[in-house]
Image: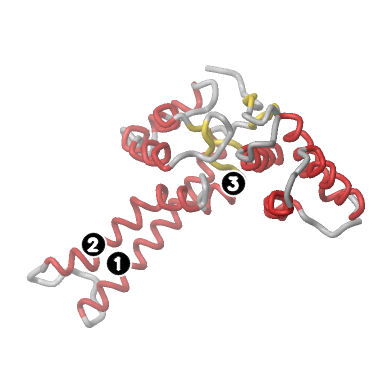
Amino acid sequence: MSSELSGLAVDSVTGIDVSLPVAGAGARAYAFLIDWHIRVILAAAWYVAAALIYNGRLSLTPPPNVASLWYGAVIVPALSIYFLYHPVLELLMRGRTPGKRSAGVRIVARDGGAPSAGALLVRNVFRLIDSLPMFYCVGVVATVISREHLRIGDMAAGTLLIYEHADVRLLAAAGALQGMQRLDAAGAELVAELLERWPTLTAESRVRLAQQLLARYGLETRAEEAALRERLAHLVRPWQGPAP
């Protein structure tokens, strides 16, 4: 059995070294229990409402002559809510679910970025193996004995479950700016400083740091400058707070 891993170092494409704090079995179990209760309640609520409407009376039992409409309107949607809860929400919420958000964890790719739709699909398909023989025994054992606390689905999909951390958000933000041709590693570090120190900076300091970034790349046109300003405004919004 491996020792507790405090974090996994990631060399990002921006040149910023980020340590991802890997979540263990406890955080996984906490998030799973919350999500399990949510999806059970949602699936049961659909079944009850649809059955009452279908039967037209206070009865939840299938009619004597079960028709395909019963399965299509009552059974299939309830099962879909239960089994598609994780893949759909993880895709829409970029590696999160309500349970994961409550536990302060999220799914990331090995490079620290958001996982692809394919990776999330593979990860969830392998729940069938992780849940064997019952109560996720295989998955729990795998997270305890593996160095990075991975279940089988994570191993197959190339994903990690990490604690939400300022460095992780910083990596995602700087990575988004990396797509701009002019941004290099030094520029990414300047962005990192701007984002990391944003809540503690005065309005003048915020303007000065932003201007340094704009000036560094010698933006030739107002359109280029406006585009970068818009991207920066979008990225710093989550870190924004009132100026001291």
Callout 3 crowding tier (Cα within 10 Å): few <14, some 14–19, many ≥20: many
Q: Which residue is mark 3?
A: 103
Callout 1 crowding tier (Cα within 10 Å): few <14, some 14–19, many ≥20: many
Expressed as whole percent of the image width and height from the top left, the position of residue 120 reads 42, 40
Residue at screen point 25% across, 72% down = 51
Expressed as whole percent of the image width and height from the top left, the position of residue 43 reads 35, 61
Q: Which image quadrant for residue 42?
A: bottom left
What separation in Å lies between label 3 and label 2 (alpha carbons)? 31 Å
Q: Can residue 139 be seen?
A: no
Q: Can residue 136 be seen?
A: yes
Mark closer to the chain start, 2 or 1: 1
Callout 2 crowding tier (Cα within 10 Å): few <14, some 14–19, many ≥20: some
Mark closer to the chain start, 3 or 2: 2
The reply to whether callout 2 and callout 1 are in contact (CB within 8 Å) is yes
Mark closer to the chain start, 1 or 3: 1
Q: Nearer the viewer, residue 94 or 205?
A: 205
What separation in Å lies between label 1 and label 3 (alpha carbons)? 28 Å
Q: Nearer the viewer, residue 49 or 212?
A: 212
What secondary structure is found at the residue carrying circle 1? helix
Q: Which residue is mark 2?
A: 75
Mark sitting on residue 64: none
The reply to whether callout 1 and callout 3 are in contact (CB within 8 Å) is no
* 21 displayed left or right of 45: right
Residue type highlighted by circle 2: Ile
Residue type highlighted by circle 3: Ala
Placement of 185 over or under 65, stated as above or below: above
The outermost residue toward the top is 1
Q: Which residue is mark 1?
A: 47
